[in-house]
Amino acid sequence: MKKLLNTLYITRQESYLHKERETIVIKQGKDKLGQFPAISISNILCFGQVSVSPFLMGFCGEQGIGLAFYTEYGKFLARVQGKQTGNVLLRRAQYRWADDEEKSVAIARLFVAAKIANSRSVLMREIRNHGDNPVINIAVKKLATSLRRVKSAKLVSEAMGIEGDAASVYFGVFNELLRGTGFVFGGRVRRPPTDPVNALLSYAYTLITHECASALQGVGLDPYVGFLHQDRPGRVSLALDLLEEFRAPWADRFILTLINRRQIQTSDFITEASGAVRLTDDARKTLLTAWQERKQVEVMHPYLQEQIPIGLLPHSQAMLLARHIRGDTEYYPPYLVK
């Protein structure tokens, strides 16, 4: 199993990164903010006005260190990629499958089913921990119906439609999971997020999407060619497919924990003139510190039957997906929680 290494999140504006011997140095003007051994770093995520030396970019490409750039709000901009690795036969098989509706929908159904099942598990966990809730009970039953429907989907578009309906049900009761903290969630708003809860969710989804893209590249798959999400220039469609398994059990539960434990407050957000809402710099540091800690927590993988850190879940699922596409396994086992 791949070793879980550190991810550098560069959020300080006007920072500059460069390579010094076998280390990565972070500076702001003449001030050195940090210096880290390159061997301990797996990814570098740059948010906002962050510059990277061309030599460090080349080094990251050669060493397989993920380097990606985002806006200050967390919208993906670009990523640096070195030479393609992995078996070309695997990628050719992936492209053929993506062009085959029958094969695509077979995998797409699993991604959607996992998302719905894991969303339902989050709601059922709320009932177990905090007592019966009629509104959530209704949502749980509706998600069970969606789960049955997706099993018979014949087209990718049909699976996407079921996924959209299930997401509407799930987010329709998400406000019930916020426990007296001043946060209010009125529904999912993506680009740009216009309230604190949506800003937090979008940020967490962005972080996991990068992890999924890196994991897929690591096993030789092309993160830009998906089965559920269709091809679009610049969109890591397969990474978004894989993200569906992790939205509820990883991202949503993490954000709920931050809010309900009051690690993040309503005062930790800035509303721009455009109406977009974003975290303050200090709050972003709080979130990223908790995120790194969460990635270290070990869980039992339901298929592999071994304890692995949460941060390695995208890598385990990418490996299982590659095995299925190669023909080593008859089915792809998505990540499911109880």
Image: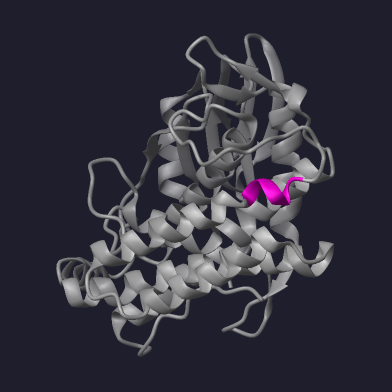
* Tag count: 0
Q: Residue at x 59, y 29 (%)?
A: 195
Q: Which residues are magenta?
A: 174-178
Looking at the picture, tell me which residue is in the foreground, 208 or 32: 208
**Looking at the image, residue 55 lies above or below residue 245:** above
Q: Residue at x 51, y 64 (%)?
A: 245
Say which quadrant the N terminus sits in: bottom right
Spot occupied by residue 264 in the image (x, y as percentages of width and height):
77, 34
Looking at the picture, tell me which residue is in the foreground, 295 or 198: 198
Q: Report if residue 292 is visible in the image.
A: no
Q: Residue 296's quadrant in the figure?
A: bottom right
Q: Residue 267's quadrant in the figure?
A: top right
Instruction: Let me know if residue 20 is in the magenta part.
Output: no
Q: Residue at x 51, y 68 (%)?
A: 142
User: For the stretch drawn in magenta, what is the main secondary structure?
Assistant: helix
Looking at the picture, tell me which residue is in the foreground, 40 or 261: 261
**Looking at the image, residue 164 lies above or below residue 183:** below
Looking at the picture, tell me which residue is in the foreground, 295 or 118: 118
Spot occupied by residue 159 in the image (x, y as percentages of width and height):
32, 66
The colour scheme used here is one colour
Spot occupied by residue 81 in the image (x, y as percentages of width and height):
36, 44
Left or right: 78 in relation to 68: left
Instruction: Let me know if residue 176 is in the magenta part.
Output: yes
Spot occupied by residue 218 in the image (x, y as percentages of width and height):
43, 61
Q: Report if residue 38 is visible in the image.
A: yes
Say which quadrant the C terminus sits in: bottom right
Left or right: 263 in relation to 232: right
**Looking at the image, residue 139 lies above or below residue 77:** below
